[in-house]
């Protein structure tokens, strides 16, 4: 058995072909997993892009005690952008997904294999205050990603890993962000990932 490499690799340290190979490998592996678990032929499945709100309920946890999202401003549309919490204190992990959405939907399989920060694409780039991301599936921490190191590449603040985090159907999960200091700041992070589910559940290509 080989070691599991969960760390983020900055996009700019990879060729376009290498990035594509990681994406395709993750997608194919997730398709095979879903086909086996659902006892369904590959022809009946579809792989598509993640929807932040409908698939993940991204940035929905605005609980003043431990929510990553600023109190009163949960995201309710298909947007990755959100305001981070200035309520939960400093040097803490904040929950990104509200408790009633922390179970993946039936017949839906998700793989998350990277993260991006789009702040350098806007006219006046904003400072970002979340430095680490932790994804928990079931009772296991599957990765801790250091998004700060991606700032070495200012024109493409993005990272990818060949060891995707897999969230099977009907499985409890959450993603946590680490806030060194309490901050009401607009965060421009988005996840790189893929959804596999039966054809016709959402799209019918």
Image: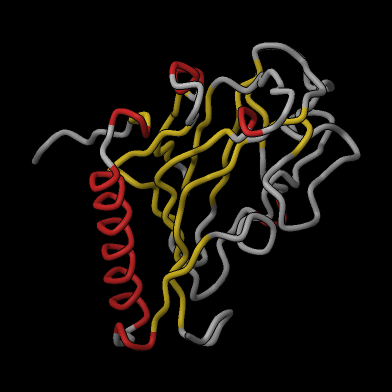
Q: Residue at x 62, y 23 (%)?
A: 130
Q: In which quarter of the image is residue 87?
A: top right
Q: How many marks?
A: 0
Name the one closer to the observer, 1 or 197.
197
Residue 26 located left or right of residue 182: left
Residue 89 located left or right of residue 91: right
Name the one closer to the observer, 108 or 191.
191
Q: Where is residue 56 in the image (x, y as percent from the top left)?
A: 62, 56
Q: Which residue lies furthest to the right in this view?
A: 72
Q: Where is residue 23 in the image (x, y as percent from the top left)?
A: 33, 53
Q: Position of residue 174 (x, y in %)?
A: 57, 44
Q: Which colour scheme appears in the figure?
A: secondary structure
Q: Quadrant of the N terminus?
A: top left
Q: Residue at x 28, y 76 (%)?
A: 36
Name the one closer to the observer, 28 or 158.
158
Q: Residue furthest front?
A: 123
Q: Quadrant of residue 144?
A: top left
Q: Position of residue 86 (x, y in %)?
A: 82, 21
Q: Is residue 109 above or below residue 46?
A: above
Q: Is residue 18 above or below residue 107?
A: above
Q: Residue at x 54, y 73 (%)?
A: 106
Residue 144 located left or right of residue 164: right
């Amino acid at each position: 058995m080989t070691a599991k490499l969960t760390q983020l690799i900055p996009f700019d340290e990879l060729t376009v072909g290498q990035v594509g190979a990681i994406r395709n490998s993750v997608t194919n592996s997730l398709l095979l997993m879903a086909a086996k678990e659902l006892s369904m032929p590959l022809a009946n499945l579809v792989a598509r892009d993640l929807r932040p709100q409908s698939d993940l309920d991204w940035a929905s946890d605005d609980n003043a005690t431990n929510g990553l999202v600023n109190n009163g401003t949960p995201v309710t549309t298909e947007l990755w952008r959100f305001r981070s919490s200035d309520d939960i204190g400093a040097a803490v992990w904040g929950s990104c997904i509200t408790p009633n959405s922390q179970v993946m939907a039936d017949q839906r399989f998700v793989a998350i294999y990277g993260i991006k920060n789009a702040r350098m694409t806007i006219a006046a780039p904003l400072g970002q205050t979340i430095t680490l991301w932790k994804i928990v599936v079931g009772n296991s921490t599957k990765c801790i990603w250091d998004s700060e190191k991606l700032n070495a590449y200012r024109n493409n603040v993005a990272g990818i890993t060949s060891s995707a985090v897999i969230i099977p159907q009907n499985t409890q999960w959450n993603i946590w962000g680490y806030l060194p200091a309490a901050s009401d700041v607009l965060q421009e992070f988005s996840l790189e990932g893929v959804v596999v589910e039966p054809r016709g559940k959402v799209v019918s290509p």
